[in-house]
Every structure is written in C-alpha cells, then in structure tokens.
Amino acid sequence: MSDAVLTEVADGVMTITINRPNAKNAVNLDVAKGIAAAMDELDSNDGIQVAILTGAEGTFCSGMDLKAFVSGEMPFIEGKGFAGLVEALPKKPLIAAVEGFALAGGFELMLSCDLVVSANSAKFGIPEAKRGLVAAAGGLMRLPRQIAPRIAMELALTGDFIDANRAYELGLINRVVEPGTALEGAKALAKSIATNGPLAVIKSKQVILESQDWALDEMFPNQQKQVDVIFRSEDAIEGATAFAEKRAPNWKGR
C-alpha cells in the first residue's frame, strides 16, 4: 500500500491513516487508491471487525488536492468514487477520528463514516461554493440526511465552517474529546464494537442505512429478510449460551 495511506490492525480494529501531513492530508489519487485497498481488506478479512479513518499529524483531511486537480489528476476510483470510499461504503463499521480540519472532501469522508470521534478544537465544513465548486462527493446528499435540511442548506450555500461543539449539537459527531486524543477515543469506541457478534454488527449497520429508504408498510418485512440469517446463526446460539453461562462469547462469524 502507498505511503500516502498507512494501515495497522490490532485486536480486530484496523486504523487507516491518511499520511500527507505536508498537504494537510489532501486527497490525491494515491490516497484514493490506498483507502480503496483498505476498505477491501476491511470487508474481506474476518479478523477485522471495525475500522478507524484518521489523518496524520493533527489534521483529518482538508479535502481534494486542488493542485493535483488543476493538473488533471482526479482522486476517484471506479465503482468507489472520491477517495475510494464515498460511493461504496464498507459493510463493517467505520469510525472517523477527527483532529484539526475536516473540510470539503474531508468532511464528505467523515460523512461516509458510521461514527465520529472529534477533538473539541476541530472545524468542519463544505466550502466548495467559495471556490466555484460543489460538494459532489456526498456532501449535498448525505448532509441533509444526517442533520436538519435547512442547516445543511446553509452550510452548502455559505461554505461557512462549524466547530466541534456545534457539530455535536447537530448530531454530526458522537463524542467530543480533548485535542490530540481523537484516535484514542475512536479506538475505545471501536473496542466496544469489536467485542460484539460480527454478523449482528454488520446486519445492524445494513438495516439502519437501508431502512432510510423503506416505506412504512415495507419496514418490518424488509428487516425480516435481512435479519433472519442472524437468528439462525451459530453466533446467536453462542451469545445466548455465553450469557447463561456467565462467560464471554466465542464468536465464529457464522
């Protein structure tokens, strides 16, 4: 994998680090390829339960590398979109650990994650309109699904930033921590996920995401189709047995 993206795996948790600190971790094609490869590894490796996406040296991601853009380079991967992620989300949970700035495409990467742990000093925004661009990597579509549409409209049209406390109030982030500890906080959150049944975690994420588009009369039938396999799994029996025997479950992922 390119040095532009670093990965490590420990205790079922993959940490993915955008490693271009001199460019404020802006996304170029190397970063897109690296994230795409990491997402493939996340979903194909049974030893990984959850991943964390972060940036090196105090910045999450400043967005698309505009210098590369004007030279003709596009940081898109076919079938996966911008940064190798925004159009093809992983089936396993993905947590953003945010320090510094999550702006433009960096903010859209964060919106593509399932959970967010942020330093209280972080800033967020989609300032593309200030550069004659639009937040087309999911910002204009995901943001009004995650917060009130009028607030999303304001952020898109003004390009203004918000701070971590405002993002928390809006429900954009899960936990606010002291500067320099976002990755530590994300690892603690990931650990609490990684101890759970892997099939149950994957299906829970799937239903939450897909049910946003289900009609009211389709909700429970559609959910039943998705979760039947869980109630018939070995892990479901193991979870109940372990509870009765007052021990930690031994998950098999089947």
Image: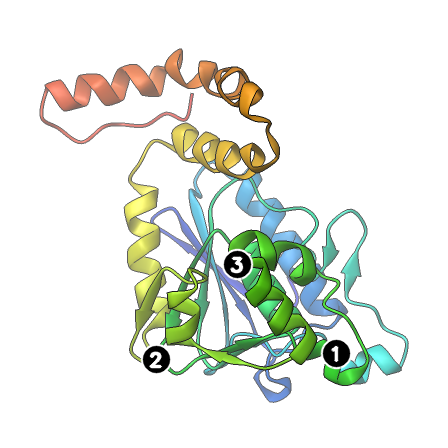
Label 1 or label 3, whichever lies nearer to me, is 3
For label 2, count other residues whose C-alpha is less than 10 Å away and answer few (under 14), some (14-19) or many (20+): some
**3 left or right of 187?**
right
Q: Residue at x 32, y 18 (%)?
A: 236
Q: Amino acid at mark 1?
A: Ala
x and y, in percent, of residue 202 in the image: 47, 34
**In the picture, residue 116 is in which quadrant?**
bottom left
Quarter that holds the C terminus = top left
Q: Amino acid at mark 2?
A: Gly
Which residue lies under the disc numbered 3? Answer: 148
Label 3 or label 2, whichever lies nearer to me, is 3
For label 1, count other residues whose C-alpha is less than 10 Å away and answer few (under 14), some (14-19) or many (20+): some
Residue 88 in sight: yes
Counting residues from the start of the chain, the first of labels 3 and 2 encountered is 3
Q: Residue at x 49, y 78 (%)?
A: 162
Q: Identify the element where label 1 is drawn.
A: helix
Which residue lies under the disc numbered 1? Answer: 129
Which of 1/226 is in front? 226
x and y, in percent, of residue 76 in the image: 78, 61
**In the picture, residue 5 is in which quadrant?**
bottom right
Q: Identify the element where label 3 is drawn.
A: loop
Residue 65 in sight: no
CB atoms of marks 2 and 1 within 8 Å:
no
Which of 72/108 is in front? 108
CB atoms of marks 1 and 3 within 8 Å:
no
Q: Which mark is residue 180?
A: 2
x and y, in percent, of residue 17 in the image: 52, 68
**8 left or right of 143?**
left
Q: Which mark is residue 57?
A: none
Q: Amino acid at mark 3?
A: Ala
Label 2 or label 1, whichever lies nearer to me, is 1
Q: Residue furthest front?
A: 150
